[in-house]
Amino acid sequence: MKDLKDLWEFGLETYDASTNQRFDMHVALMTTVSDFPGYEMLSGWSTKGYLACPECHYETDFEWLPCSGKTVYRANRKFLDPSHPWRHDKRNFDGKLKERCQPIPLNGIDVEYMLRDFPNAFGKKQKQPRRDVDDPNPWRKIPIFFELPYWKHCSNRHNLDVMHIEKIFFDNIIRTLLDISLKTKDNLSARRDLVELNLMPELQLIELEDGSEEFPRSRFWMSLEQKRKFCQVIKNSKLPQGYASNLSRCVQVGERKIAGYKSQDALFMMNYLLPIVVKTTLPKDVASPLIRLSPFFKGICSNSNDPYSEVIPEPKRKSRVRLQGKGVKKSNLKKKENKSDFIFLAEFLENMQAQLVQQLAPSVTNAILTQLRDANIFLLTKMGNLLNLEPQSIRCMASKMEMK
Ligand SMILES: [Zn+2]
């Protein structure tokens, strides 16, 4: 801490090779990166219990699941656009409308003001603050960073490490899909809590006449043979060198288990292998949300696209191919009179194919591109006729615009 203060106040003499001069370099701490338990140590806000989200702070929506004995945070629809249809979707969610808006994170000045009289007591003798639903005191301590004069003005003080989260995410998906006992999230208490939450009646336990309970099969249920195939695909995958460790070592096909991989491996499997495996083994309605997760995580790690658009489809999605900002229905392309509106260069089509193949099946991509190419040829012929060109020169132009 002392070093950080000194670096900010007095700086450190540093040599600048480009100007061949010495200067005083001042250093500021802008942000921290940690895992979720580390977040508590750095921010002073408890990441356990009722108000576990430091971003949503006092506005965290929590629910207590009596059978699983866990606190859950489900009100995720509040982060959607206020006009998003999912906010009014009672049928597919818990039968409630979601009208609350996204909470505004606390800024540094507010935090400093709130904690101005907070007793910072450390060690085992520290009195545990009272915690219950009416008064869930989330603060643990005043973060030491507030000793830095500029800290309260930093807007994004804490970040979470994606690698760590992605690994936990992947662990839970795999354990649930392969139904690994004691580790799967789809267990008896979870099913009992569904009754409490009034969710998914088709998955709630059914009481039989002899007093026992029947456990209805979920949509992602896999037979032993499917699980074996699932493991086999991962085991047999051949990866470029340096992408992940030896994955076949982590897969036990006989026991239908995948374990002992590192964060880097989980990241790779999540981004590249899971979509393939899931697509070949699971029904489409289960597979597609899982497939959408991988571009979501890729999006979080890159700064170019909006990751949420990958998992949350745009409202009222119809069969539309977006071209240069203008929505064009696929059926429009079939009508001859509409075809003359577009002209596409070979680079554009190539580029589009590269982008689409990542998100859609190759057969769908090909269908779209064939229609675009048809539109191309139709337009060229029309232009040629208007200009009185020879049919041969029209064909020549068309072949130049076509993809090889
Ligand atoms: Zn939150």
Image: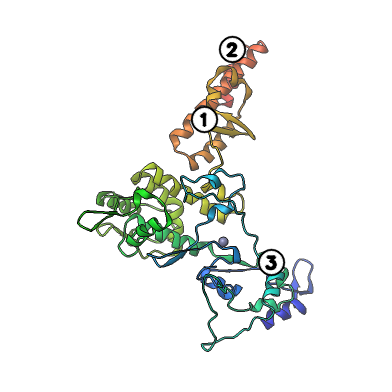
Q: Quadrant of ligand 1?
A: bottom right
Quadrant of the frame with the N terminus: bottom right
Residue 334 in picture, x, y percent from top left: 52, 21
According to the image, label 1 marks what residue? 369
According to the image, label 3 marks what residue? 107
Q: Say which of 58 and 26 sits in front.
A: 58
Regarding residue 86, the answer to whether it shows in the image is yes
Residue 231 in picture, x, y percent from top left: 31, 54
- What's the distance in space between the residues labelled 3 and 2, CA to CA? 68 Å
In front: label 3 or label 1: 3
Q: Between disc 2 and disc 1, whose residue precedes? A: 1
Estimate how packed mark 3 is, as few (under 14), some (14 to 19) or many (20 or more) residues with alpha carbons within 10 Å. Answer: some
Q: Between disc 3 and disc 2, whose residue precedes? A: 3
In front: label 3 or label 2: 3
Farthest bottom residue in view: 125
Q: Measured along the vertical axis of the image, is residue 106 above or below residue 330?
A: below
What residue appears at the point 59 percent right and 21 percent down from the top-left corner?
A: 339
